[in-house]
Image (tube, rainbow, N blue to C red):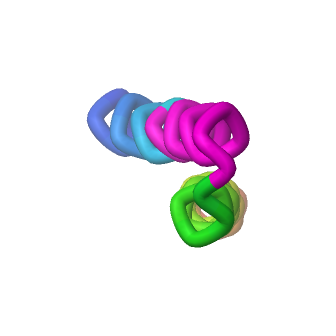
Amino acid sequence: MGLDDKIGNTADKLGGKGKEAAGDATGDDSLKAEGKGDQAKGDLKQAGEKVKDAFKKN
């Protein structure tokens, strides 16, 4: 996994945590859900990169 990918995935996760916290603080359920979705997207992208790395090593 390249450094750019790691940074991008981490940014997705952190941005999602921020949105979720903001939604929780303001009572905005849609913002909270969007934040959770962003976190999941970052996790999925990171998992995909790990799979690609595993195949590159073999």
Part of the protein shown in magenta? 15-27
Please tell me which residue lies in front, 6 or 54: 6
Please tell me which residue lies in front, 52 or 32: 32
State left or right for residue 9 relative to residue 42. left
Please tell me which residue lies in front, 9 or 39: 39
Residue closest to the far left: 4
State left or right for residue 40 relative to residue 45. right
Instruction: Name the residue rendered at 36%, 28% in the picture.
Output: 3
Residue 55 point in image, percent of width and height: 65, 68
Q: Is residue 43 visible?
A: yes
Instruction: Name the residue rendered at 71%, 41% in the picture.
Output: 24
Dividing the picture into quarters, in which one does residue 45 lie?
A: bottom right
Q: Is residue 20 magenta?
A: yes
Question: How many numbered discs?
Answer: 0
Q: Is residue 44 magenta?
A: no
**Looking at the image, residue 12 lies above or below residue 41:** above
Please tell me which residue lies in front, 14 or 24: 24
Dividing the picture into quarters, in which one does residue 58 lie?
A: bottom right
Specify the principal SS of the magenta part: helix
Residue 38 point in image, percent of width and height: 54, 60
**Looking at the image, residue 49 lies above or below residue 20:** below
**Looking at the image, residue 41 lies above or below residue 53:** below
Residue 44 point in image, percent of width and height: 66, 67
Q: Is residue 50 visible?
A: no
Dividing the picture into quarters, in which one does residue 35 lie?
A: bottom right
Instruction: Name the residue rendered at 59%, 40% in the picture.
Output: 26
